[in-house]
Image: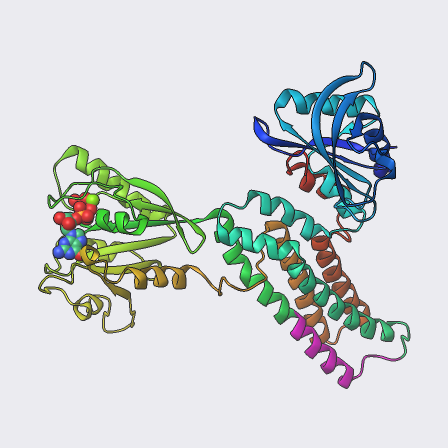
Amino acid sequence: MSVLFPNDETIVAIATPPGQGGIGIIRLSGPTSISIADQLFRPAHGRQVSSLESHTLTYGQIIDPENCQLIDQSLMGLMRAPRSYTMEDTIEFNCHGGQSVLRQVVELTIRYGAKVAEPGEFTKRAFLNGRLDLAQAEAVADLINAKTELSRQAAANQLVGRLSEEIYELNDQIADLLAEVEATVDFPDEELDLLDRSAINYKALLISDAIKQILQTSNNGRLLREGLKIAILGKPNVGKSSLLNELLAIDRAIVTEIPGTTRDTIEETWQLQGLPIQLVDTAGIRQTNDLVEKIGIEKSTAILQTANLILLVVDASRPLDENDQYLLKMVEPKQTLFVLNKIDLPIETSADELSSRFSDGKTEISPIIIQTSILDSIGITELEEQILAVVLETDLSQSVLVTNVRHQEALQIAQTSVRQAIDSIQADMAAEFIALDLRGALDSLGDIVGHTTSDDILGRIFSQFCIGK
Ligand SMILES: Nc1nc2c(ncn2[C@@H]2O[C@H](COP(=O)(O)OP(=O)(O)OP(=O)(O)O)[C@@H](O)[C@H]2O)c(=O)[nH]1
Ligand SMILES: [Mg+2]
């Protein structure tokens, strides 16, 4: 019964995090939440809970009716259906935030018929009752989990429906096209004529383009979700640790004028405009017989395999030597920003000189070189801008960002289906085939907002939520 009529039950959960706090909130949602509150809560003004207006906050006492024992003094919020998060009658007790108080109140509500909520059950009800679509419901969890300003922004935009709007818009365009194609299916004698075909082809291409544009944001979305790893590499004494400290704005790594100061890799988390970054300072790479230094250098070299971006630091005050040459050969120019440091000193290696090392006469590769004096904080802003320009495919400030892998996969499937439809149109295939592909695209888009999503997937999505949300 609970599966068929999930909303017949009233659920309860502690909505605030475990541990002590000034206030702890207990949330009830479902058809009997007001009558449960009626039995447990005595408003100070003497009125019955069931007679109170919606969206009011009432001061009173929570009392165990069996023995008239006072459990807590509390503020009770009342929201009547459908004007609540779940669209059901909802009660929120703002209690004193001690675990014993909160547990007792929950136990009391259970004794009067409430059921302990599963993780995400409030939001699942909001979705099932049509308050939120699935992409918005997922944004609730993303918002709670957001660790940087940027991921918070992306989740908030998704929560208010910006992504959903784009999906509905695509959905409408495909549905219109499908209707046009299906109109000819119903009259098998009327084949799609040349004019129809090219008009349909044009519309399908526009749709494919629109999906591509949304999908392009998913690379940024992935960076927001997983972050990226940036490694600072270079020969000894060029200023790698100084750069780490400058970017982090703290004295994290030891800096001395002695080459070979950093012996082991140092990893720190850093945020660049809300992008989570793992920043790695490495041991300077050079020919050496020192065992400890050798091991450090091996680690520095291994980082090349795992870093998304390399900052290769070169000392402008010294001529390029065999250690620099070795490093210049080792890195992939497309995955590297070249930091020409110590430009406050007399220049021995210019940007042109460094750049010329990359042209072999045949292919022209122009490396990105940023000239810096870390000592005087010169060139750091430009370096940060270049990092963003290299790692981001599109502007981060846009309102719609696909951050969820599930959405990305659904969009990719929709994209493939639309492309197949285009192939069928261009290959003069029968309208049935085109319609089949377009219907496939509609199904995938429906998955994103939850129109066609299976119970299994719904279960998996909501089980990742915290209790009480
Ligand atoms: N003049 C000048 N000196 C700098 C600059 N950046 C760093 N230095 C100095 O260069 C020396 C080496 O700096 P580090 O940051 O320790 O260099 P590193 O690349 O980490 O060296 P290892 O750990 O030995 O590989 C220190 O004395 C720094 O103060 C700069 O822009 N200008
Ligand atoms: Mg160092």
Q: Main secondary structure of the magenta part?
A: helix
Horizontal arrangement in the rendering, residue 443 relative to residue 228 (left or right): right
Horizontal arrangement in the rendering, residue 423 relative to residue 194 (left or right): left
Horizontal arrangement in the rendering, residue 312 relative to residue 429 (left or right): left
Front-lying residue, 443 or 381: 381
What residue do we see at 29% from left, 40% from top?
266
Q: Residue furthest top?
A: 67
What residue do we see at 60% from left, 54% from top?
156
If the image is split into quadrants, where does the C terminus sit? Answer: top right
Where in the figure is residue 411, as x and y percent of width and height?
64, 59
Horizontal arrangement in the rendering, residue 401 relative to residue 260 (left or right): right
Residue 37 in magenta? Answer: no
What residue do we see at 10% from left, 43% from top?
258
Q: Quadrant of ligand 2?
A: top left
Q: Residue furthest front?
A: 45
Front-lying residue, 449 or 162: 162
> In terms of image quadrants, where is residue 115?
top right
Q: What colouring method underlies this structural image?
A: rainbow
Considering only vertical position in the picture, is 270 above or below 356? above
If the image is split into quadrants, where does the N terminus sit? Answer: top right
Where in the figure is residue 219, as x and y percent of width and height?
51, 57
Considering only vertical position in the picture, is 396 above or below 198? above
Residue 158 appearing in the image: yes
Considering only vertical position in the picture, is 148 above or below 351? above
- What segment carries the magenta color? 190-207
Front-lying residue, 413 or 319: 319
Where in the figure is residue 176, as x and y percent of width and height?
79, 72
Residue 199 in magenta? Answer: yes
> In terms of image quadrants, where is residue 113?
top right
Where in the figure is residue 47, as x and y percent of width and height?
85, 34
